[in-house]
Image (spheres, rainbow, N blue to C red):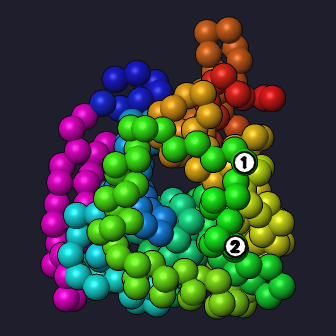
Amino acid sequence: MTAQTYRAVPNTRRARVRQGTIYSEVVGQGSPLLLLHGLGASTRWWQRNIAALAYRHEVHILDMHGFGRSSGQFVLCDAADILAEWMQHNGIMRSSLIGHSMGGYIAANFAHQHPLLVDKLVLVDPAISVSGVRPEMGGFGRQRHSVIPCSMVATALYDLGRAGLPTLAKAAHEMMTRDMGPILERIKASTLLIWGEHDSAVPVSMGRELARRLQQAKLRIMPAPAMFQCGKSRRSLTARWRISWPVQRSSTGRPTSVAGFNGLEAVTVRCAPETYGR
């Protein structure tokens, strides 16, 4: 184990929650941290992030109902309550959450509905709509900078097929049409917003609006990447947003992280080394 990563084989779990089974993996030691995947994704999309996070946290990665290796029917409006039941089943009294895209939408709802269960939030390009600004779910194909490495194509296709078009369409419609503004204004948890500079599906203007509405928020705009860009690293769909504690520096003193901020105890987001600072 180094100062930057934690290497261990995750423990797999399956918990019966309502009318389905939720698959999850847990690795690391420390305060609990939940990773919530995006629309049409799964636990597999976080694999390149786990090692850095698990050094100081007990990291839980889960598939929501109907996604990845979980069973049951996914209903977006029930996701926050189902997550609370899942935490109770696993004996987690309070946790920080990192949510990407739809996972950010769920995390924000969870923080509003179950504030006592939330420590801190990290929302990575959350698919959240507020009055006057909303995500463009059809924007994925227009992103000039989007790169999906060959190693992830099979996973992406499998996860999309596993969720099914009706589920994806219904969830996307809810995220695009529901005004989350009043909910965001009631969230008290310290929140880090992470945005890809060229994300056309969930534009940076949305990040600025969320930062304005949240009570305790900081926006970090990552240079160059679109929502799913891997760039030269070709490591994973989230390679540009490796989140780690604390700030790390290379042997030459060059920072490999973007510093954290008030209340998030040095929560940081690691850029791909070859693109940092451009």
Residue occupying image coordinates x 63% and y 47%: 146
199 or 119, which lies in front? 199
- Label 1 vs label 2: CA separation? 15 Å
Let me know if residue 9 appears in the view: yes
Residue occupying image coordinates x 37% and y 57%: 157
Check if residue 24 falls in the magenta segment.
Answer: yes
Check if residue 222 falls in the magenta segment.
Answer: no
Q: Give the SS element for disc 1.
A: loop
Q: Which mark, residue 19?
A: none
Q: Residue furthest top?
A: 252
In the rendered image, which quarter contains the N terminus?
Answer: top left
Where residue 192 sits, quadrant-wise, is: bottom right
Which residue is labeled 2 in the image?
Answer: 136
Which residue is labeled 1 in the image?
Answer: 144
Say above or below: 128 vs 246. Answer: below
Residue 74 locus on image (x, y percent)? 34, 83
User: Pointer 2: residues within 10 angstroms few (<14), some, or many (20+)?
Assistant: some
Residue 63 locus on image (x, y percent)? 31, 65
Q: Which residues are magenta?
A: 8-29
Ranked by sequence position, the earlier of labels 1 and 2 is 2
126 or 8, which lies in front? 126
Q: Give the SS element for disc 2.
A: loop
The number of numbered discs placed on residues in the rendered structure image is 2
Where residue 65 sits, quadrant-wise, is: bottom left
Tag 2: amino acid: Glu
Say above or below: 253 vs 37. Answer: above
Let me know if residue 116 appears in the view: no
Secondary structure mainly formed by the magenta segment: strand
211 or 41, which lies in front? 41
Residue 228 locus on image (x, y percent)? 58, 50
